Image (spheres, rainbow, N blue to C red):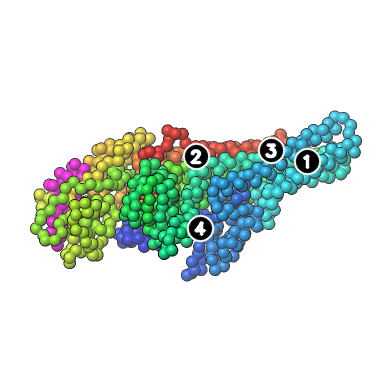
Amino acid sequence: MLGTPDPEAMRGHALFRQMQVQGIIPSDESDLARLEPDPAGVPEDPAGMPEVPAGEQSEERVLKVTGMWCPSCSWVIERSLRKKEGVVGASASFSSDRVKVTYLPRLVGPAEIAGVIRDLGYGIQETDTEEEQERALRTELIRLGVGIFLTVNVMMISFGIYQGFLTELSAAAVRMMGVPIFLMSTVVVFYCGFPVLERAFHAARVGGFVMETLISLGALSAYGLSVYQLFRGSLHMYFDTASMLITLILLGKYLEARIRYRAILGVEEIYELLPGKARVETEAGEQYASIEAVASGDVVRTLEQEQIPVDGVILSGEGRVDESKLTGESRLRTRRTGDTVLGASQLVSGELRIRVTGVGSGSAIGRMITLMEEAMVQKNPAERLTDRIMAVFGPVVILVALATGAVLTASGSPLEVALVRMITVLVIACPCALGIAIPLARVAAIGRARREGVLVVNGDALEMACRLTAVVIDKTGTATRGDYQIIVVEDVGKYSGPDALGLAAAVEAGSDHPVARAIRRHAASVGTEVKGAVQAEELAGLGMKGIYAGEEVLVGNEALLASEGINLTMSWKEAATKGADRGETVVFVSRAREVCGMIRLGDALRVDMPQAVADLKASGLEVHLISGDTEGATGYVAGLLGVDRFKGGVLPADKVEWIRRLQGEGHRVGMVGDGANDAAALAVADVGFATGDALTVTKNASDLTILSFSGRRLLAALDLSRLTSRTVITNLFLALVYNLVALPVALAGLVNPVIAVTAMLLSSLTVVGNSARISRKAPDETIHQS
């Protein structure tokens, strides 16, 4: 299965080390925890889970589990797995049908873990395709069809028996009609209801109570009493009740499974993108190989209309590539020799030879799946509270049902009346709707967000984003396109060797900053010789420092030169000020502590950002613009955007302080910026929105990553947050109202078991259907063309 990002690798990143030294990011684990996915998804009970021995490496595996019918199933699976020697963490998600297990491979293996789940009556789905889903649903449909056919016949014959209450029926007549319904209800209860009974039995083995426990007790009680009454020749038989309980639960869960699958379709679709095979070049010629056998450095060939199976660099060829299923961006991209391509994208035209750089869990699609799985198994405090409620709810309901029967019997009511009342209490009180109210809405939102190019790393951020009161936007690459173009290069021309542009390109050779990319691109286009500098060092918010031909070279802003004690002449300052007033970014180049040139760059505003800012302000949000660029350039862009609050010339530490100041004023702050350069600010903000691409998703210290960023996608993410929050509140209201009303109604004897199980199923279907609204999207809501 897919791996997870290595936290140690994140801590070792040069940017993080520099931020820790500067005090921007604390080095203690508590604050760093926000920069990486929660490894366990849900806090474990320290007393109940073993610790990982020092020096021993644990592994993680995410399994797709079939047959979970209610949230209590996930609790039973977690409890059983945690009792297995070698398992150090387990978190199950009913909404996504996935179980994440952390284990010690020395003590337990994947096959044994899967065996624990299968022993509980659940299945493990090895492949994750729509065909597998449909096959599983067809199996359930067969049981449901048999159940409906037999239950209808049981009901029809039972009506005849009920006539005996109005006319005289002999004991022989009662048995003649009773034996057929006994046989048919036996098939319904023990064949059609086998999954229900099996899960109830396995849950009882580990001391758990699930929805199936209550239904099984109700159906078996009605069935057992009916068998007893049949041999007595009594008219008081409840085979129809037992059959209806089983059939209705099968019907409800079948409908729920179909609706729930549509609700989380956006999540399921991404698994279908995983490549299966690749055409690999070998010494013996081209051969097809499973994707597991492909390694970094291999060369694969992809033909027109084929899926690109790996991340890699194009060695030869040219083609038009569709990356929409990864990024949500529908425009085709032309990729040529030297360009990077992503696995799971589609080659619409052309032919490519690709050197593999990432495959499986190391590819962009693999990392996206890993982060989505992390987000789906995370549980917020409200979910953990409902889990604890459901863990004790079953035993409490059973005790209430027994007490109800005892009170009725003691008061002189017939045994049949007491038993029917007990069955009604058992089946009506199942808290399934409460258990799925929050997680199903979140999983549906994660799926829809992925389809729209927003990768959710922190599930709680989906609900928090709608409660933001201020948004801080970084200028470069966020408000602007980050696609710098060189306007002019001014060079003093007094040095031999490379000019200012060549020196800048040499020092910037290892930087991924948009300015650095523009300088290298322009140097290559004009044929300036570029040789890499040695000891090149990136200084966050300032620029680059390096050694070229034994001399120190600085490439950066005026603050960088000032920090090194290099003064600008008045003419340089005036030229820089004029450029900044026009919104240009000015980069100085110094050699041997003397300024030898200046590079002026322009960066176009994203076309939809002014309208996005206007919409943000209209919704009541306070919008701020900050940048490491000069005050003049930042102010120019702020004027184009219509932003009144802005600050230029800020370092990463200043961005953090800006956010903390707003938080100190009572604001809930969202930060929108580059996932690497703004990592500290993204981590400190209440919700971090990282701009990026599918190749850099695991480098972002954000809650949400907006792929192929645009202003419309930012607004769409906030709109989705509002929809998710409303859906969760509605779900909780519906579930709580049902549970508060249903139990008193059943205790009062106002409903019978059939109505009770129908009401219970309708409550769950209402919550599922309400959550499915998140996945529905009208044509005018799509943001793919942004």
Is 50 left, or right, of 220 in this rendering? left
Q: Amino acid at mark 2?
A: Ser
Q: Earlier in the sequence, mark 1 or mark 4?
A: 4
The answer to which of 661 and 671 lies nearer the viewer is 671
Cα gap from disc 2 to disc 4, whole angstroms: 27 Å
Nearest to viewer (mark 2 / mark 1): 2
Q: Categorize mark 1 by other alpha carbons within 10 Å: few (<14), some (14-19), many (20+).
A: many
According to the picture, the residue beneath numbered tag 4 turns out to be 1
Where are the magenta residues, as a range?
573-598
Q: How many marks?
A: 4
Residue sitting at x 50%, y 64%: 58
According to the picture, the residue beneath numbered tag 3 turns out to be 756
Nearest to viewer (mark 3 / mark 4): 4
Cα gap from disc 3 to disc 1, whole angstroms: 16 Å
Q: Secondary structure at mark 1?
A: helix
According to the picture, the residue beneath numbered tag 2 turns out to be 775
Q: Secondary structure at mark 3?
A: helix
Q: Earlier in the sequence, mark 3 or mark 4?
A: 4
> In this orientation, does residue 685 appear?
no
Above or below, 148 against 92 in this view is above
Quarter where residue 528 is shown: bottom left
Q: Secondary structure at mark 4?
A: loop
Is 652 left, or right, of 689 in this rendering? left
